[in-house]
Image: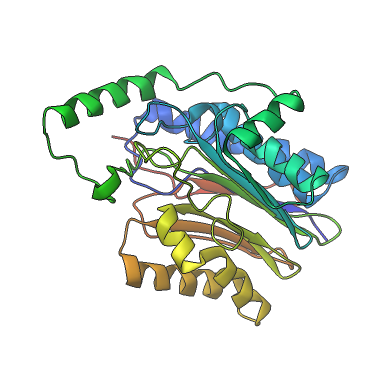
Amino acid sequence: MRPIIVVHGGAGSWRVDSTLLDSIKAALENALLSGFRLSYSGSALDMVVESVKVLEDSGIFNAGTGSTVDLSGNASMDAGIMFEHRAGAVAYVRYPRNPIVLAKHVYSYTNHILIAGSAADDLARRLGLEPHPGPSERWVALYKDYIERIRRGERIPTHFSRSLSLWMNIGDTVGAVALDGNGRLAAAVSTGGIFLKFPGRVGDSPIPGAGFYANECGAAAATGVGEYIILSHLTLKVVEGICRGKDVAKASKEALDALTSRFGSKTAGIIAIDSSGRLYAAYNTEAMPWGYIDGSGKIALGGLPNPI
């Protein structure tokens, strides 16, 4: 098999200038190259974890060091991986710089699938993982501005008015799917969640079959409004469709169309790959930066926003 890896930087509106657009492209290409290098010595799991780690470290996307903040003003993150019928995930973590690395430790060294909150943070500390630097100045400033507007009684547009959770369309979950040289498939995702989410909220990213899924047929990673993705079992539907003989494009389109029909547009996106190396990206938002690199070394990017 020729190895291949696909990554995305989140579905949304992506209001960016030309400088930020160049940074997005560079981050995607860096993630693809870094993950693909491991195809020579590692597995599909190693490939997707490394690619997502690079995206977390870029600070551009809503994951890792670029994570948004919740209503308490803190960054709280989710991440998950799946490979060879096993999964590992963490939810509502604040300590690790790279939640995807902690999710890999859960996968590799525990008998569990999902560890959450302070217990997951304590595990990260015991493992000696690098601590998170805290929310960026950009997110802190935005948080203070919105909290002040809310206190003044201003009405804020929101997807979930009961908890004042806002989907800001300025970067979302990051993810990767990969096929390695032995024909094995893996998926990985990481996110800082929805801006001003209720503290303790967990989205789709640590939930197998929602934010990520992989088996011998295919692998998929989702991005968007986590509650909708969970209720739609988005990635599970894509991979099950591939297992039933549908091509990856048809399986992805049908699963996303079903979500859109129920919850509306501007809600989700997905990347997927099958066991033959056929790949597809679909989204119902204005943009979803994504790209792939294949065994020939070819890199292609798509879903990029138009600069303002």
Quadrant of the snapshot with the N terminus: bottom right
Q: Quadrant of residue 215?
A: bottom right
Residue 37 seen in this snapshot:
yes
Seen at 20% across and 44% down, the residue is 157
Task: Looking at this view, name the residue that lies furthest to the left.
Answer: 153
254 relative position to 267: left or right: right
Q: Which residue is drawn at 42% across and 57% down?
A: 227
The residue at 44%/42% (across/down) is 172
**Total of numbered circles in the picture?**
0
Q: In which quarter of the image is the C terminus?
A: top left
Quadrant hosting residue 200: top left
Quick check: 168 above or below 271? above
Q: Where is residue 246 in the image (x, y as percent from the top left)?
A: 61, 79
Above or below, comparing residue 103 to residue 134 in the picture: below
Judged left or right of residue 179, residue 210 is left
Q: Where is residue 282 in the image (x, y as percent from the top left)?
A: 47, 61
The residue at the far bottom in this view is 244
The picture places residue 56, in percent across and down from the top left corner, at 58, 32
Q: Position of residue 11 (x, y in %)?
A: 42, 49
Relative to residue 35, is residue 116 drawn left or right?
left
On the rendered structure, is 276 left or right of 194? right
Along the line of sight, the residue nearer the viewer: 38 or 89: 89
